[in-house]
Image: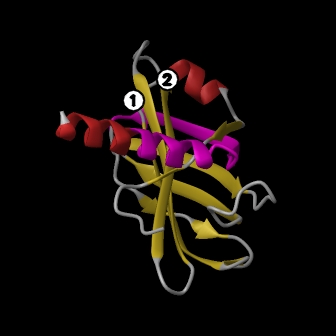
């Protein structure tokens, strides 16, 4: 009984932590992704994480992400930070992303999109990520969309 109570309280604490970050939104714009062959895929997009008064959990940042990949490649690649790395009390260390996709003629196939932001406040390091999985046709049609970051397990806070 004691183990169950502790497990439930731990789960509720984790949910509360995720909810606390629901005001943080990352905006993806100008997405262009596709595959010409199984070994010739590419993607390009901009991503902006706004620093708002509502959220003190993540820094504001702006990055441009582009890569040439292969079909179903889910290896994160570095994005180029645009502007300052300093945002409030945080320093943005890096932004990484991947778009794992298939050929456009493979109807019903899923595309996986993920962005990871690593930052620090001078005493601790943090990793947040956000992503989405969607049918390929719906994914490439959406040029602009929002994703909601969560803290990765092991992030200090």
Q: Position of residue 102 (x, y in %)?
A: 39, 29
Query: Up-down: is 23 above or below 62?
Result: above
Query: Residue 113 magenta-drawn?
Result: no
Q: Residue furthest top?
A: 107
Q: Quadrant of residue 72?
A: top left
In x, y percent, where is residue 40? 40, 43
Q: Nearer the viewer, residue 147 or 68?
A: 147
Residue with the most extreme bottom position: 122
Point 42% across, 34% down: residue: 101
- Dot 2 or dot 1, earlier in sequence: 1
- The Cα–Cα distance between marks 2 and 1, rounded to whole angstroms, is 8 Å
* Disc 1, SS: loop
Residue 60, compared with residue 111, is above or below; it is below
Disc 2 marks which residue?
Answer: 136
Part of the protein shown in magenta: 12-38
Image coordinates of residue 123 in percent, x first then y, are 49, 85
Residue 27: image location, x then y, percent = 71, 46
Q: Residues within 10 Å of mark 2 (few under 14, many from 20)?
A: many
Q: In screen coordinates, is 46 left or right of 18?
A: right
Q: Where the N terminus falls, by quadrant?
A: top left
Q: Pointer 2 and pointer 1: residues touching (CB < 8 Å)?
A: yes
Place residue 141 in its image quadrant.
top right
Give the residue number, with chain letter if any, for mark 1.
102
Q: Is residue 24 magenta?
A: yes
Name above or below for residue 2 compared with residue 128: above
Instruction: Classify 10 Å Cα crowding around label 1: few (below 14), some (14-19), many (20 and above).
Output: many
């Amino acid at each position: 009984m004691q183990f169950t109570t502790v497990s439930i309280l731990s789960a509720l604490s984790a949910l509360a932590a995720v909810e606390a970050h629901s005001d943080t939104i990352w905006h993806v714009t100008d997405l262009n992704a596709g595959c010409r062959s199984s070994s010739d895929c590419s993607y390009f997009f901009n991503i902006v994480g706004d620093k708002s008064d509502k959220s003190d959990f993540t820094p504001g940042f702006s990055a441009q992400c582009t890569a040439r990949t292969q079909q179903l490649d889910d290896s994160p690649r570095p994005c180029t930070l645009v502007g300052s790395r300093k945002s409030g009390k945080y320093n943005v260390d890096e932004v990484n992303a991947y778009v794992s996709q298939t050929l456009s003629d493979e109807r019903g196939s899923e595309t996986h999109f993920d962005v990871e932001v690593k930052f620090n406040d001078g005493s601790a390091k943090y990793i947040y990520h956000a992503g989405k999985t969607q049918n390929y046709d719906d994914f490439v049609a959406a040029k602009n969309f929002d994703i909601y970051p969560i803290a990765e397990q092991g992030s200090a806070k």
